[in-house]
Amino acid sequence: MRYHAGIAEARLHESREYVDSRGRSPFGRWFTSLDATPAAKVVRAVTQMETGNFGDHRGVGGGVLERRIHSGPGYRIYVAIDEDTVIILLGGGTKRGQQSDIANAQARWKDYKNRKAQGERHAAHP
């Protein structure tokens, strides 16, 4: 349970950013490139997912989900669920780059699972 301004908020999921073998977060890099308004919408979408509300989403193959945000150029957040409780933030983008963003997210999810199976502890960070 997380407490914010004195209000208890149940968290069904915890979100973590995928980090590549060089310690870089593709989601973080994308997120920091956003202006304030779309960044706030992304934060809201991630918070909703943490509480179990995945909103407008669909599976895009390989265990990856695409969370759509109907704003501006059609923002997308790519995630996967690890151990039923952890949301791995694989990346983000817009409708325009959707196909390559999906392929990248699928490759990152596969890399995450492989590195986790090999015992690597830092394939994602909060």
Image: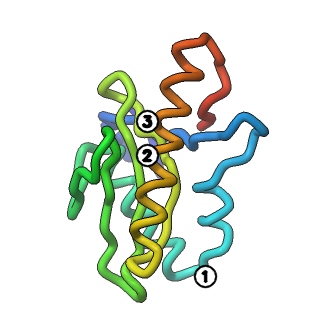
Residue labelled with disc 2: 106
- The amino acid type, in three-letter code, at marker 2 is Gln
- Sort mark 3 into few (<14), some (14-19) or many (20+) by Cα contacts within 10 Å: some
Residue at image coords 30%, 34%: 12
Image quadrant containing the N terminus: top left
- The amino acid type, in three-letter code, at marker 3 is Glu
Q: CA distance from mark 3 to mark 2?
A: 20 Å
Identify the mark at residue 122; answer none if there is no mark.
none
Percent x, y of residue 6:
44, 46
| Towards the viewer: 83 or 52 | 83
- The amino acid type, in three-letter code, at marker 1 is Asp
Residue labelled with disc 3: 14
Task: Name, please, the residue furthest toward the right.
Answer: 22
Q: Is residue 106 left or right of residue 25?
A: left
Q: Secondary structure at mark 2?
A: helix
Q: Is residue 49 above or below residue 116?
A: below
Q: Is residue 119 above or below residue 42?
A: above
User: Where, by quadrant of the figure, is residue 122 drawn?
Assistant: top right
Residue at image coords 41%, 54%: 78
Q: Work out whether mark 3 precedes mark 1 in sequence or the reverse, and give the earlier one.
A: 3
Q: Secondary structure at mark 3?
A: strand
Percent x, y of residue 75:
41, 74
Residue labelled with disc 1: 35
User: Where, by quadrant of the figure, is residue 56 drawn?
Assistant: bottom left
Image quadrant containing the C terminus: top right
